[in-house]
Image (cartoon, rainbow, N blue to C red):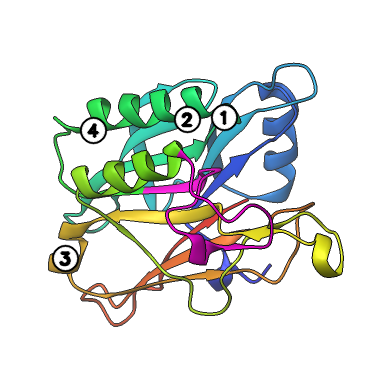
Amino acid sequence: MIQQEQPYIVFMQETKCNTNTLESILSKAWERCQAVTVDATGASGGLAIAWNNQHISLTNFHASHYFIQAMFHLIGTNIHGHLTNVYSPQESTQKIRQLETLEILNAPRPYPLWITGGDFNMIRRLEEKLGGRRKLDKESNNFKDYIQHSGLIDLPFDNVIYTWNNKRASTQQIASRLDKFLIADNFVHLGGDVCASILPLASLDHWPISLQWKNLGKSNRRPFKFEAF
């Protein structure tokens, strides 16, 4: 990958490996990379945040089986905030409990800026789903309430809608917008242009997503780029 195209930070879900294995892979694939990880349980799960320590620093980590959170500082600027990498569970009650945990954890956060992304495993409205059962679950209503109460904006993608599909054809196909970036609504006051997109590389049944924050007041500064896989 060309250096100017490399992200500042990458969120990974379903790594399916332990810390030692993942750090070994990252050390070969990404120079000057640091990472914090949550080990997989058997052959499932696993989370990580990896970042370029020349451009961004991370501190104050909180982690569980389903999320990793940290405070960040964009080096060379006065921009501080919070990052959360999310991989929501499958079971509805656990999803709702996780939303409650994240809302409580971030209610008293020191910096208002908050960027959260990953696989939320939920939709907010039926327009985010193609095929399958045409009814919103309780978790969808809780997800909408969580976004509103937390002062978050659900960034639309600038290319396609769905981030997951069941890899079936014709009338058996189901596709959903399960992966997304949510940003604090104060983001707009910091300036610059923010956009989210789906990357063309398919990863199993999910597509990776990218967020870029451009034009942060210095013409020579390259985009502040996040990717979630």
Nearer the viewer's eye, disc 4 or disc 1?
Answer: 1
Q: Which mark is drawn over residue 190?
A: 3
SS category of the residue bearing label 3:
helix
Considering depth in this image, is 227 or 219 the residue closer to the camera? Answer: 227
Q: Mark 1 belongs to which amino acid?
A: Pro
Look at 81% across and 66% down and name the residue there. 171
Q: Earlier in the sequence, mark 2 or mark 1?
A: 1
* The magenta segment: 116-137
Q: Which residue is mark 2?
A: 95
Q: How many marks?
A: 4
Q: CA distance from mark 2 to mark 3?
A: 31 Å
Q: Around disc 2, counting alpha carbons within 10 Å, would you say few (fewer than 14), some (14 to 19), or many (20 or more)?
A: many
Q: CA distance from mark 3 to mark 4?
A: 19 Å
In the figure, residue 222 lies in which quadrant?
bottom left
Camera sees residue 71: yes
Q: Which residue is mark 4?
A: 106
Q: Mark 2 belongs to which amino acid?
A: Lys
Considering depth in this image, is 222 or 125 the residue closer to the camera? Answer: 125
Nearer the viewer's eye, disc 2 or disc 3?
Answer: 2
Camera sees residue 57: no
Q: CA distance from mark 3 to mark 1?
A: 33 Å
Is there a contact, CB below 8 Å, between mark 2 and mark 1? yes
Look at 50% across and 61% down and name the residue there. 126
Considering depth in this image, is 14 or 138 the residue closer to the camera? Answer: 138
In the depicted structure, whether residue 130 falls above or below residue 150: below
Q: Around disc 1, counting alpha carbons within 10 Å, would you say few (fewer than 14), some (14 to 19), or many (20 or more)?
A: some
Q: Mark 4 belongs to which amino acid?
A: Asn
Drawn side of residue 93 relative to residue 73, left or right: right
